Each structure stands twice: as structure tokens, then as C-alpha cells.
Image (cartoon, rainbow, N blue to C red):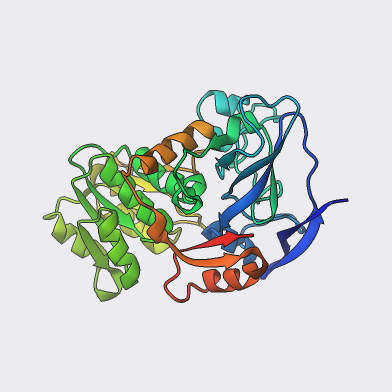
Amino acid sequence: MAMMKAAIFVEPNRIVLDEKPIPDVGPLDALVRITTTTICGTDVHILKGEYPVERGLTIGHEPVGVIKKLGSAVQGYREGQRVIAGAISPSGYSNACLCGCHSQDGPGTKHGFQPMGGWRFGNTIDGAQAEYLLVPDAMVNLAPIPDGLTDEQVLMCPDIMSTGFSGAESGTVRIGDTVAVFAQGPIGLCATAGARLMGATTIIGVDSVPERMEIARKMGADHVVDFTKGDVVAEIMRLTDGRGVDVSIEALGRQETFEAALRVLRPGGTLSSLGVYSNDLTIPLDAFSAGIGDNKIVTTLCPGGKERMRRLMDVIASQRLDTTPLVTHRYKLDEIEEAYDLFSHQRDGVLKVAIQP
């Protein structure tokens, strides 16, 4: 039996590199040889035991690679073709998919919906931090990489760019809007870029790490507020002359950032929540205008599928955005345990790590 190396969840606080069999390919599947992948904040939640997955699961949901083998029923692709697949890999035929909720895909369930059901890689099936990845429903999920784009140029498309952009999209950012983005990690930075692309004319980023604050300006932030140097809410209200923002995007997943994002909204504004939360949230009565402020709170899980990936890669190919500065560190797959140690402890100004064979 042919074997491959893979980053495997063993128990909380322990992900190790080990060997497991290369997957068999079903009729609608594709086997992809991974050429580059990365580590996500959600993987760290799994590492810490904050998000439960089965022991023995291969982690990772951000694949860039080359088609090694196609299933017998897969059409429109060729072996040797460079591709990506989204972190969300929908079936394409469930009730959820057919009404546009690909991330909540529920094939096989009674009504066709399942919370977070579209997130399969590194959650319910083996993921991308390995030498090979089995992509189910390949004709729904594989997106060919345009000629001339490198692995690192498209590495953010499967998750970080898709998630960040969706924060601006779900917030329905409009031309001329004022937008605040809480946390300028990789997802927050892409939310900042997404708000700029959608027409926001004043974008306020919130963070405290100097390197992230600098990249935020390059991504489109007009102001960057250091939350360690004062009252963030007061400063944003000052910057908006007391009006508040049209859209606030929460990209961290904590009570304090969620509450601040709610407090800076103008009446009728929208809070677009991207963070993965580990504890219950409380909505303060005053910040919520007693429930009658015409505000909206929306949540989003990274949109996936091949058309989403095509659109994101077109943004890169057209030079509307360069996400390569987000890759701050590079490791071999054999060094992935070291990469997890660096990334989970957020040392050395790390934003994203590129993992290659």
C-alpha cells in the first residue's frame, strides 16, 4: 500500500507528522498532489482542542497542487493540471447548495442543510497538510490556476481571501461607505482589501502589531487604530465625527471585539462577523439600541466552490490585489510541527506560513 506524509491530529495540543495510506479515488473524486498549503487560525483552534475533530484526521483546508489522478466520471480536467480547491468543498446538489448556502451543505441530511457542512477538508474528511489530498465532487470544487500565477499568489484564495472578502460582501459594503475592520490578521487584512474593492471610501483598521498595521495601510486602510493606546470605540467615533460606521467587520472571534464592532455602528448599520468564537457572546443592551436600532448582525463561513475560486484568482491575475506579503514564513512539510509552534504562538511577526513538500 502506497503511503504519504500527513499532519495528523492526535489529541489536544498535539498535531504530528506521520504516514497514512494515499487515498483511493472514487468516480467523482480527484487526487491532488499538494505543492503548497498553509496553516489557518482554525487549525490552531483544532490543535488547542477548542474545535473538536476526530483523532487521526489530517488537518488543513487550503490546497494548491497538481491533479495526480482523476475519477472515472470526472470531465473537463486533465492529470498534471495545476488547481486549487476552496476550504469549503460543497457537494453542489444539496438543498443548501441549490439555494446558494454552499457553506451549510447537507447532502444526505433530511432537509439538505447542515451547519458548516461545506467545510469538509480538515474537519470531517482528511485535509491538505499532506503530500496528497482527495478532493470529493471534483467537478464542483477544482479550479484551474491561470497561467503565470505562482502557488503563493493563489495560496490565500481557498480560505483567507474568500473569507475576508465575504465579510465585506455580507456586510453589503457600498460605494462611499465607512467601514471598520477589527483585527488585521490575514482574514482582517483581506476584509480591508475587500471593502476597498467594493467601494468603501473610509476604512478604519484595528490592531496593535506594527507589521500588521503597516500592511493594513497597503491593503486599503485609511486609518489604523492601535487598540493598546486608548479607547477604540471613542477613537472610531472621533474619526467619523460621531456618526459611526456603515459596516463593521469582526475578524477575531472575541467578546471584546464583537462588542466594540457593535458599538461603533451608526443606526441602521451592519455588523459582519467573521470570527470563530470559542465562548458564548453577550449583546449589551445599550450597544444594541434595545433591539430597535435597525442594525443587522450577519455571520459568514468562507464561500467555496470552483466559481468562487475562479473569481478570486481573477482578482489576483488582474493585479487588483497582491496577497503575497501575507506569506511571512516558509517551511517544508517535514517541518510542519515547527511551523505550528511558530504560528500558534504568533512569534516573529508571522501572518501566514507556506508549507511545501
Relative image position of residue 135 (x, y in whole percent): 67, 40
Instruction: Report the label total.
Output: 0
Seen at 59% across and 69% down, the residue is 340
Seen at 53% across and 33% down, the residue is 306
Residue 97 against residue 204 in the figure, above or below: above
Q: Find the residue positioned furthest to the right.
A: 1
Seen at 57% across and 28% down, the residue is 96
- Residue 136 visible: yes
Residue 241 against residue 93 in the figure, above or below: below
User: Which quadrant of the structure image shows residue 59?
Assistant: bottom right
Q: Is residue 99 left or right of residue 167?
A: right
- Residue 208 visible: no
Q: Is residue 221 left or right of residue 30?
A: left
Q: Nearer the viewer, residue 257 or 216?
A: 216
Residue 164 against residue 13 in the figure, above or below: above
Relative image position of residue 127 (x, y in whole percent): 66, 50
Seen at 71% across and 29% down, the residue is 28
Q: Is residue 103 left or right of residue 245?
A: right
Q: Nearer the viewer, residue 38 or 95?
A: 38
User: Which quadrant of the structure image shows residue 214?
Assistant: bottom left
Relative image position of residue 112 (x, y in whole percent): 64, 28
Quarter of the image with the C terminus is bottom right
Relative image position of residue 171 (x, y in whole percent): 34, 41
Residue 105 against residue 180 in the figure, above or below: above
